[in-house]
Image: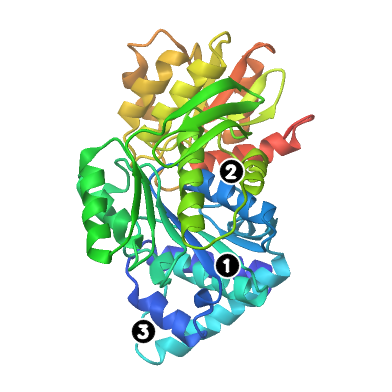
Amino acid sequence: MNYTESLEYLNKLYGMLGYDLGLGRVEALMKSMGNPQDKAKIVHVAGTNGKGSICSMMTSILIASGYKVGTYTSPHLEKYNERITVNNKQISEEDFAKHMTLVKNKCAEIANEGVSQPTVFEVVTAAAFNYFAEKQVDYIVLEVGMGGRCDATNVIKKPEVSVIASISMDHMEYLGDTLAKIAYEKGGIVKENCPTVLISENKEVYDTIKQICKQKNSKLYYLSETGAKAVKQDIAGTVFDVKNEYLDYKNIKISLLGEYQLMNATETLLACKAMNDNGAKLSEKAVFDGLADAKWKGRMEIVEKEPFVLLDGAHNIDGITMLSKSLKKYFSDKQITLLIGILGDKEYKKMLEVIIPLASKVVFTEPHSNRKWHVEAVEGLVKKYDVEVHIEKDISKAYTLAKSITDKKNVVVCAGSLYLIGELYKLARASEGGII
């Protein structure tokens, strides 16, 4: 297959299979490929929100430490290649097609043995592992797709550390309807005799992960509070100190924006400590340099000026709540135009209740997904807010509209769905002066 044919193959699989969690198919697939996932050290990251940021920070730190680092994240914003990188360079279209062709052929082989067709995520995960093995990476920074216990990435056997980022209510139809149930699924990445890192104020989450770690003889590095304090925080980045039972550092710089990045950075530091305690050699300088250099596309990212345009992949109630706190911090002196498009299976009423009061104008649009929340439902939900409302289904027109009704000294905030953010990223790149 060439690159276009590879994408057509994935789209066909998605239409046929959708989500189907479980490890049987991917274990058979990886075995047929010689288990390439076992050929590098792995940092495995699960969580509801924050896992992508932690992956970007860990990747940057490992690169600063002199290692060759494969990173696997999802979903992508613009193209599948974003999911698979080596030292932050995306897999080429030629390599993507090559490894996708190999995986497709292996899927046909295992089908002859009675194994059902792996899902899109399983196929891409297998291709990523094979690419990383070919490139002989030292480390793989591996982001869970959904949950953890039954996620395709959980085919790995012995990570250097399992990191569990912020846990909240999302994907309840697959993971359960309580935090304890969701934590149990996320905690499925905990492995025998491998350290685990968790920061959570929630007792249900802590008790669940603690019990799993006890069963697995996994040393748990746990904090209920980060002990992190911002020294300086603006749109240029954050400088912070952190002091807790594991860490004591001053004047740490991170470029990633967002109030919540203090917790993500602290959890990354905690993961580095767990790794060093188990024989890794991550110097303090490499850790600090890596944190300062880390970037994460489409998450609290300013892509245009005059007016500022901020893209953030806040797509659930926890993400929207964290975004709202950050907007109060960074843009308290500016009027906000909110451009939002939400999926219908999210808690959209609660999301709107949190974010709309911060805006003076709102533009509602629809993500390119059959799960989209239809904007016809807007009117009944926003009557109670003192806000100027615009409805534009077409994303490109909605983006142009949001910028046109916003004074140059103010800010357009775009959020609600990663499908939306991906489309807006393309539009920002096409704009004069966009993607700054």
Distance in Å between CA atoms under marks 3 and 1: 22 Å
The residue labelled by disc 1 is 8
State whether residue 365 appears in this view: no
- Image position of 26 (left or right of 90): left
- Disc 3 crowd rating (10 Å Cα; few below 14, some 14-19, many 20+) is some
> The disc labelled 1 sits on which kind of residue?
Glu
Image height of 111 relative to 240, above or below: below
Q: Quadrant of the N terminus?
A: bottom right
Residue shown at 68% from the left, 41% from the top: 293
Q: CA distance from mark 2 to mark 1?
A: 19 Å
Front residue of 164 and 213: 213
Instruction: Kindly identify the residue that appears in the image at 37 percent across and 55 percent down.
Output: 196
Is disc 2 placed on a helix, strand or loop? helix
Instruction: Report the mark closest to the observer, 3 or 1.
Output: 3
- Residue 327 locus on image (x, y percent): 51, 20
Q: Position of residue 372 (x, y in %)?
A: 41, 41
Of the two numbered discs 2 and 3 on the same chain, state the one appearing first in sequence: 3
User: Where does label 3 land, which residue?
Assistant: 115
**Residue at (42% x, 35% y) in the render:** 342
Identify the secondary structure beneath mark 1: helix
Is 111 situated above or below 378? below
Q: Earlier in the sequence, mark 3 or mark 1?
A: 1
Determine contact: label 3, label 1, CB under 8 Å.
no
Q: Which residue occupies the extreme right position in the image?
A: 432
* Residue 83 x, y percent position in the rendering: 58, 57
Q: Image quarter for residue 405?
A: top right
- Going by the numbered disc 2, the residue's amino acid type is Gly
